[in-house]
Image (tube, coloured by chain):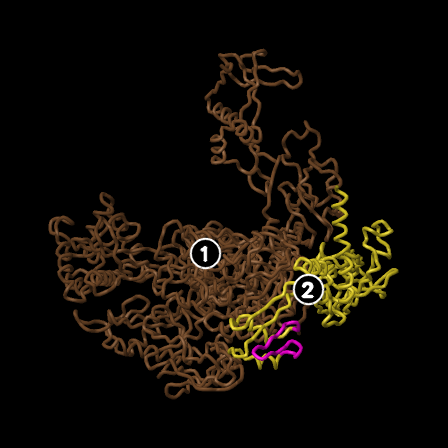
Chain colours: A yellow, B brown
Amino acid sequence: MTLTIMEQSDNYIRFKVTDITPAEANALRRTIISDIPKLAIDKVTFHHGQIRDEEGNEYDSSLPLFDEVVAQRLSMIPIKSDLKMNFKDNCTCGGKGCSLCTATFSINKLGPATLYSGDLISVGGTVSKPTDAEIPILKLGPKQAILVSAEAVLGTAASHAKWQVATGVSYKYSRKFIVQKKSSIDYEKIKQQCPSSVVSESNSTVTFTDDVPCHALTPLFENKECKIEEDSSSYIFQFETDGSLSALDVLDYALKRLPQRLNTLLESLVDSE
Amino acid sequence: MKEIVNAFFKTESIVNHQIESFNYFVATKNNPNSVMQQVVDETKVTDEDEPGMMTLDKTKTGGRDIKIYFSRKKGNGKNQSEASIWVERPEIKEASGASNQITPNEARLRDLHYLAPVNLKVRIFEDGVEKEPETIKIGDLPVMIRSKVCTLHESNLDSYIEKNSGPVNGTRKEKLQYVGEDPDDAGGYFIIGGGERAIVSLEDLAPNKILVEHEEKYDAMLEVAKVFSQKGGFRALTSMEKQADGGISVTIPSVAGTIPLVILMKALGLEKDVRIHDSIASVRGMEPIIYSNIEDAHDPKYLPPSGVNTTVDAISYLEKRFAAGQAKEFREKKVSQMLDKSLLPHLGDMPEDRMKKAVYLGRMARSLLELHLGIRKEDDKDHLSNKRIKLTGDLMEELFRAAFQSVMKDLKYQLERTFNRKKGIRLRPAIRQDLLTQKILHAMSTGSWNSGRTGISQLLDRVSNVSTLSHLRRIISPLTRSQPHFEARDLHPTQWGRICPNETPEGQNCGLVKNAALLINVTEGIDEAPVLQLLAANNLMEEAEIGNKLGRVYVNGDFVGYHESPANLTALIRKERRSGRLSSEVNVKHDTETNEVIINCDRGRLRRPLLTVKDADVTVDKETLKKIDSGEFTINEAVDHGYIEWIDAEEEENLLIAIYAYEIPDKCPNCSTYLHRNIVGWVNPGKTEGNTVQIECSECGSMFASKKLLNKDHTHLEIDPSLILGVVASVIPYPEHNSSPRITMAAAMTKQSIGLYASNFRIRSDTRGHLLHYPQAPLVKTRVMDYIKYDRKPAGQNFVVAILSYQGYNIQDAIVFNKAAIERGLGRSSFFRTYSAEERRYPGGQEDKFEIPTHDVLGARAEEYYKNLDEEGIIYPESYVQGSDVLVGKTSPPRFLEEGGDKLGPQRRRESSITMRPNEQGYIDNVILTVSESNSKVVKIKVRSERIPELGDKFASRHGQKGVIGAVVPQEDLPFTEDGIIPDIIINPHAIPSRMTVGHILEMIGGKVASMKGSTIDGTIFSGEPERGLRDGLEKYGFRRSSTEVMYDGILGTKFKADIFTGVIYYQKLHHMVAGKFHARSRGPVQILTRQPTEGRSRQGGLRFGEMERDTLIAHGAAMVIKDRLLDQSDGTILYICGNPKCGHLAIYDRRKGTLKCPVCGNTGNIHPVETSYAFKLMRDELSSMGVMMRLILGDLK
């Protein structure tokens, strides 16, 4: 099995894995989707009643959105995550919540204003912040204010989508589009539109791969004159992250996590004997 | 012609017909000709008084002649301008005595009626001397929201805001928000007791119109002519039939049997046989029948010795027949009652109107004979020209007429009763205001009108915004739903453009409950006089010989004369109307078959707008259209100039209407985009030359010529064919690609979809309400959505959909949902329920009290039940509540005060707290404290609960494709595309082919293109983006033309062999959710009377083990299971039966002594327990109450 990274940025990665079975490819995909930990807000405590500013002006704590909607919105905000943190259940604090497993935020905003993700202020030991400070959460009207404390913990997307790091996770079989030069397909046009790395030419045929996504190849799927060869042992993966972790970290974690899980399975099989 | 439609909806509300109708009805000072005023002018207090006044009984006023006029002053035989009745602004009289103007939202929140006082100006003449006129309040009238008397009406709102120191300089929107109103709310409904009620329009057979048809009677086909004669509130059916022997007879309402036509005509004063003949005959062919009828009247069998010859003869025949053996005076009264009141009341109720009636009967007979001879065709009862729509104004008129009459009658009685010689009459204390108010309110709050019809006013549907609009545009037919009435249910060609062809319920009301098309107008009715004047000035002839070739002219169903050139007359009337000299309410038809000119200007005709066409071109030009678009030129002005005409179903029969003015090429010759009607504009309307028109592609702005479809024969052009649909069906994209039943189903389901129903939902107190958390504007929209502001009140979300089967979890229309999508907020909604409590006052000074009940209160719960309540007994906002938790602690005074006061010690107050429904939970959203009309404290508590999509919740697309959630699957298990797209839902491919919802497929493609393009796709019926354009779009954004994609199995990781069709489509969450329906019971409450388990989820009832279920157990021989279900788990009881073979009565168990004793025979030993159902004991007890003794004689098993 070899893994070749084809394209990579902070939040996006495309790579090729060869010599694996569909089941193995899928196991990697499923791990990337649902078994990468990240921080997400899991508990929100709202202050109800009057809220006062420094000058003693009174504000109302009833919000234009329902509390449960605000809480859901807060939970979806991606937070820069530190994989050295513990899962709350397995933490040394015994699940009570400490700086090793819990990041605490507070929100204190007076209306009229728009509440953004950047208004989440980290309190306590670990300093975390949302990946993007400009996600709008809520519009406060005049005389409205929000006073909230929120706790973010590590989790995985298996239990809730708010802990999902990677999005658009997919793979495809490596495939070749073989076009006979004497066919009616306008291969020259496709050649112009696609990067040269995907084109290889022989005397009678032009062969394209879709390793690099190219729209010009799409019509070939529906063209009977084009022969498509697929290799179910070679895969091109791609995914992006919400910024809480870098794409490479996710891949790295997933590749380590996968054998761990398989070991867990194996151990449980051995134990039962 | 979108300029015209835009202009319509810019100036007028979508429920304008309702508001306009009410405005026309309601009396104000500046509208002295209102319907209310007309009713007042017409009201007769007694039979002797002339309309609009009353004369007090001289014997009760000490011989003084007192006349009270309440109608307008009359001069020159015409009503004078000043109104005698008018309605003020809505107000409430507080318990303190102060009157305050109120806003609709205040009425909603405080459970008030939204009423405005009605004032009447009364003129009193005492012995011929006029006194100072008095203005008295005669009662209150419910006010339609957004009508001209409503607080929200333009200037009314401004003055209200000024009075209440609101944002005087704000925009209208800000002002509406200030008074707690949704700025986009259409109005058109009433508020009764805090609840919004809509008055649904009624479709009725046209009154005062002769309808001829064949009817099967006594095994023979007879010709029948019918007239629903209507005058004021009175309605009477007169019918005439021609028997097989040729005899023509008339049926008069409230008179038994039939009367020969000729005798009736003679009784009415048409004495001479020649004149009878002349009034009937039109062609020679009918003469034998007429002669035989006339001859027949001379038969002595009717009146010996020589038959009926004169009017006197005829009347004595009628007297003999209908009042035989009674006093002469009474006989005369009976016959005059019959002829003047019951027969054809619309022609008058005075003896001098009799001749008119005789002539009218002659005309009926003529139509009847023309039908018999085949000159005339049977009238089509379902033709819209034979129907009239009764809107709010007409229905309110009925109520007001009856209520006003009884108020005035009561006033007369009170004045006579309380008349005091010295003080004279005193009006103010004599009037009973509540009589008018209560009569109207009772009808409005129950929906049952005087005429005995029910369901006229209905609770306004607030499920979603479109359902509200649809409700206000509903038209119901009074035909009974149980009878088949197949023809009445069918779609009729005349409904084109007037009534939505698709929006109707399925099942028993199918085709009877209808909805108005998008652009309609219902005539208010105008005075006939200008029409008659016009006719008189244009050679109308009163009389003509028999067998002439002249055309007959009718106005509102009444024959007015002959004209030698009906075609020219028709053209003339149209010309006058188009020039604005004749009211646009007038419609005219020239019936070429019977050579008749039919002119209508009465009330309730359903009309639609059309562009007029002259010489193969429209009359309106581009400049005018621009002016219409900018609002410089109103629609009414365009109508007065004859550019647009309102056409009723009658006139439409004469017209040749072009659907399109020009052809459009497939592609734009310049930019080669696929063209559709919505992106093509007509450059030179009104100025075309030859056979081409100049059109413009709005995509690239290029102009080119295209073939004209209008020709010299066309009289009109359709404004836009998409206007044939109603509000709800217009929301569906690409409906022309669907099978029609699916559109009907989609329309029904759209009305159940939840979304943003009103923008003021936080300050509303609907007893039940749903709110979608993230409503989205659809990606594939229709142009009509702009007019109804659907984007501002959406009810659905755009879902990513894949069509394939998934592990059997989407069999039979189930839908597989993506769990991650749900967690991100897909399909989330909130459910609200408002509980309300009032500190009611009881007779005797006792009242309820909001408090935490103490231990000494009867039935008080444990303290923890009241822990969320504040010291006033009301729950804190945002506290979590669930099943049977107390929301308001309340105590009530003891029930029976007098009963045994000293025996049981001091009476204890009862606990009467308001609790949550047993199977609901949620957070307290809002607590509203206010006072009721009687100044007692009212608290309204709104509970909100989050509804996250779960197994069994119902969703539907806009194509009648409904389904329930069959599985919620983790995202990694779902199939994915090579781009990493995981669908939100998976629907089953079997849902498509047999149902032929191609629109569903097109919308999926359209949504896919729109989401890549970043702008919406137009899916308007007949004129939306064509399929070719969508497929090109797919290709442009890197998809396949087939919209299929390679997908991989999320569980196995392998590629699917088939390519999967995917797309983005608008899905609606319907309000049928499992959370509001699921129910189970093991033990629970029983009914007091029968001791059987209660019924229904709200009462924690049992699930019925019915007869068929019982049958299965009998078949199995499972006797013990039957006993368990029917006895042990139901109403099984142990009875102690006296074993004395001569007794067999019920024994009594003495609990203190622990002994059994038969109270009848005194037996204490031989008593046995017997297990029976309680229902059996109940029967025994009921029989014994009737004196029948049931003895149970026990014996051993053999």
Q: Position of residue A73 (x, y in %)?
A: 72, 61
- Residue under circle 1? B505
Q: Position of residue B519 (x, y in %)?
A: 46, 70
Q: Amino acid at mark 1?
A: Pro
Q: Which residues are magenta?
A: A194-212
Q: Is residue A34 above or below residue B1103?
A: below
Residue B1061: assigned label:
none
Which chain letter goes with mark 2? A
Residue at x 43% of width, y 57% of height: B513
For this orientation, the residue located farthest to the left is B305
Side (left or right) of A125 relative to B225: right
Which of the two marks, 1 or 2, is nearer to us in this view?
A: 2
Label 1 element class: loop
Label 2 element class: strand
Magenta highlight on residue A199: yes
- Residue under circle 2? A169
